[in-house]
Image (cartoon, rainbow, N blue to C red):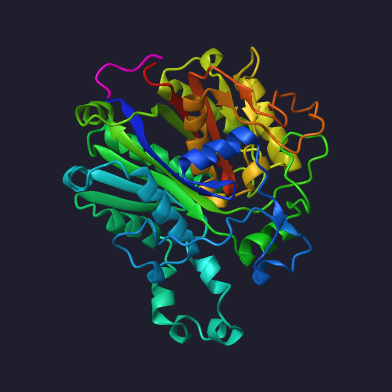
Amino acid sequence: MNVPAGRRRVVVTGLGAVTAIGVGAPEFGAGLRAGRDAARPVSSPALKDFGHANACEVGEFDPSPWLRTVDPATVGRAAGFGLAAARMATGGVPAEVLAGRPSVVAMGTAYGEAATDLDRLTEQEIAGGPAGMDPALARRMSAGRLATAVARELGLRDTEAVTLPTACAAGNYAIGYGLDAIRTGDADLAVCGGADALCRKTMAGFTRLGAMDPDRCRPFDSGRAGMLAGEGAAVLLLEELEHALARGADIHAEVLGYGLSCDAEHPVAPAVDGVARGMRRALRDSGVEPSTVDLISAHGTATQANDLAEARAIHEVFADGPPRTVGLKSMLGHTLGASAALGAVGCVLAIEGGFAPPTINHRETDPECDLDCVPNAAVEADLRVVQSNALAFGGNNAIVLFGRYPA
């Protein structure tokens, strides 16, 4: 790794996760190592009319045990996931440290609270527009309230709160935003992540696109037929290295760098050149050679176009041979605005735990993808550098690299 002289180094000192395979970073990590499959028949009546029986639901979830400031009754399901994950990530940080240092809150989402709250409205309430809704419900529908709710819950004072809506890449965009703020000295701490909840809009939209598998999600498999919908949240606490060392923080990994690309070539189909460009930028920003990357957490939606384009881009960038490339969505489903953040937390847990998570539900690797996707069972692995890919509609690609600390 070649860190530019004078650039502030950024480390991960906290992790939080609310997922369908485990709540809390330790349980999430155990689920990844075990290859847990979250796919099950949907439980919500609002989600049952789309010809697809399975999704990856968190299930009944009460954020109350984690919340100290925000009234749980004032937030919806997605924000409840995000607030709980933020509290988990910052649980070991004294309140005076959080409140006393300049900080950033950057949260990614596809829908915020609007889609899940709309599921609860009657046709008459929808027809009446905002004026016909419960005022409290209407107020919390703004996606921007996700980041401000986290800042309020954590008691942050000298902070900037931003919600990033770059769909399925939003979590990595949020990490990049926090990384830049710390590198430039605008912040010492950054609370970064993403959250989304299952809703009718997700089920209807991806069903109409023909992107849903009725049974299981099989990234890079010859028989792949699409994604399963999922939900959850993940949050990482980022800190400037010297600040973290001075307060004796536990350091989980280092954020080496990130890269963005927006090719805008097609509304939903990723472009190989755009994905490759984002990966090259991330490697360059991190000071890392492709040959030193030990594992890639792929976007891996198990759609025909996405997996093939991502695999081709990986082969283009890693011309001497791609590292192991795993698809966490095979376990978690596609959690939209939370997916990149969950992938990032998964990368950090894999580095710490010394293992490569599996791509489950795997039968036969598509020869056109030609990747070692660690089929069906985790393997022990000495991981020093891990890459997290996120690809979103409109060609919004965000790639983040994490390194073991100390290097």
Q: In the image, is residue 373 above or below residue 67?
A: above
* 382 in magenta: no
Q: Is residue 133 visible?
A: yes
Q: In the image, is residue 195 above or below residue 274?
A: below
Q: Residue at x 48, y 37 (%)?
A: 345
Q: Magenta stretch mostly in which secondary structure?
A: loop
Task: Give percent across and percent down for residue 212.
Answer: 74, 53
Q: Quadrant of the N terminus?
A: top left
Q: Residue at x 64, y 12 (%)?
A: 320
Q: Residue at x 43, y 75 (%)?
A: 138
Q: Quadrant of the C terminus?
A: top left
- Which span of residues is magenta-colored? 1-7
Q: Nearer the viewer, residue 127 or 152?
A: 152
Task: Give percent across and percent down for residue 218.
Answer: 74, 40
Q: Nearer the viewer, residue 133 or 151?
A: 151
Q: Is residue 397 visible?
A: no
Q: Residue at x 72, y 41 (%)?
A: 302
